[in-house]
Image (cartoon, rainbow, N blue to C red):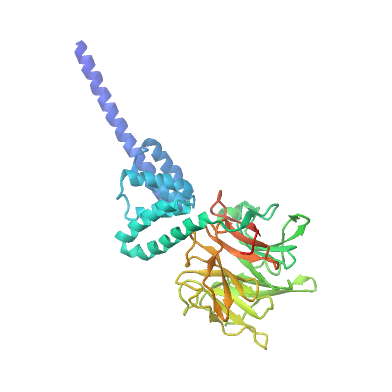
Amino acid sequence: MIPGLYKLKAALIAGILSFLFLSAQAQTLKDYLTKGDRFYMRKDYENALVHYLEALHLDADDPQTNLRIGLSYMNRENYRDAVGYLEKAYQLNPVIDPHIDYHLAMAYQEDQQYAKALDHYRVLKAKNRSLAAVATQKIKECTLADAIMRMPSKATVAPLQGEINTSFREISPLISRDGGTLIFTSNRSEDDYLIKSGSNFSDVYIARREESKWGIPQKISDAINVKLNETATSVSADGKTLFLCYAEGGGDIYTSTFENGEWTTPVALNRFINHPQYRESAASVSPDGKKLFFSSNRAGGRGGYDIYVSELGANGQWGRPSNLGSAINTRWDEDRPFLHNDSTLYFSSNGHATLGNSDILKTTLREGRWSPPENLGHPINTTGDDGYFVMTADGRSGYYARRRRDDPGNTDIFSITFTSPP
């Protein structure tokens, strides 16, 4: 064969192989994205990420791949990792998604990059009328968050040590007046089947302080832990009446009393409290036992969950509740009330200006009116969901639940030591 022909043939073969390789690579990239999309649509973000990251190995500069990875991390509440991929998707193609400014702003806000979040929320507000109200609220949150981060509250925050917190979800701490007994709710389990199937439902636990640490938690009572999910939401000043939230009726409030060394079978409160068509999600009884503050999404409120108060009648029944009004309740959610004394009410809200998601606020009753709610500030509040706040009788310590930074799908119980009154 003529030498030049060898060279021509070799070049043709190389060209064909190169074409086939590129075609296979493009097809493989598409396959990975398609497989990832199937998991994403099923909300299985962990497996979606496996395929999206494989696609990224083939083309690190593909904007759709970067967008999908960023959104998957967002849905897993891993905002720190989400930021980098969403930024790159935006840089590669600023119009890749009609909601890209919203996604980026949310990721920046959750990662406490408030200046960058504000830039994208402002763009979102200007060009997307349907999300203008959301953007306005988020702009308020970021503005306040930036100010709060510069003026931290006088408190130290730390997760409870020992065996109170696990890799599961711990919420709703309740503390006795002497600070020696802790009641809380957890979905911890050692049953792999229940965990994998999502059937590890919540139970109520109790732990007692042993010198400087908490003892091993125990399930509080078989009489209480009988439903699919139970949440202990308030305890009376004498520690003998426990208020609980059950899934019955879409979410109702029950009470159990401690008699002869045992907790009684919980009894549902009357229909003034438990509305048959709506959900009651949390409650707090006043120190004197005569008022009950609770949250509900019943009709007639100001939107989402509102906080209501009911007074105990002479017949021992709770009376018709009244809405706490616009000073406290917004069009969004006000939830998880806790009355520390007859004048100071703590609650969670995502309707007032917050660091993001739900923050803990306080309001004081003065001459029959509730004061404008005040944010408890950083480091108590974070960009995550902070709530279930309670305080010891002396006001020196508090307890609450907050999202784990290393495992955003779960929450731990934290203690607060105040260096000055909150």
Residue 381, image x, y percentages: 55, 59
Is residue 380 shown above or below 332?
Answer: above
Is residue 413 shown above or below 35?
Answer: below
Residue 379, image x, y percentages: 57, 56
Camera-side residue: 273 or 38?
273
Residue appearing at x 43%, y 47% in the figure: 83
Residue appearing at x 49%, y 69% in the figure: 333
Q: Is residue 44 left or right of residue 30?
A: right
Camera-side residue: 398 or 337?
398
Residue 341, image x, y percentages: 65, 73
In this view, the residue farthest toward the top is 2
In this view, the residue farthest toward the right is 260
Camera-side residue: 176 or 168?
176
Q: If the image is split into quadrants, where does the C terminus sit? A: bottom right
Q: If the image is split into quadrants, where does the N terminus sit? A: top left
The quarter of the picture where residue 52 lies is: top left
Q: Is residue 404 left or right of residue 101?
A: right
Residue 70 can be seen, yes or no: yes
Is residue 353 shown above or below 317?
Answer: above
Residue appearing at x 67%, y 75% in the figure: 255
Residue 1 can be seen, yes or no: no
Q: Is residue 391 left or right of residue 140?
A: right
Residue appearing at x 64%, y 64% in the figure: 421
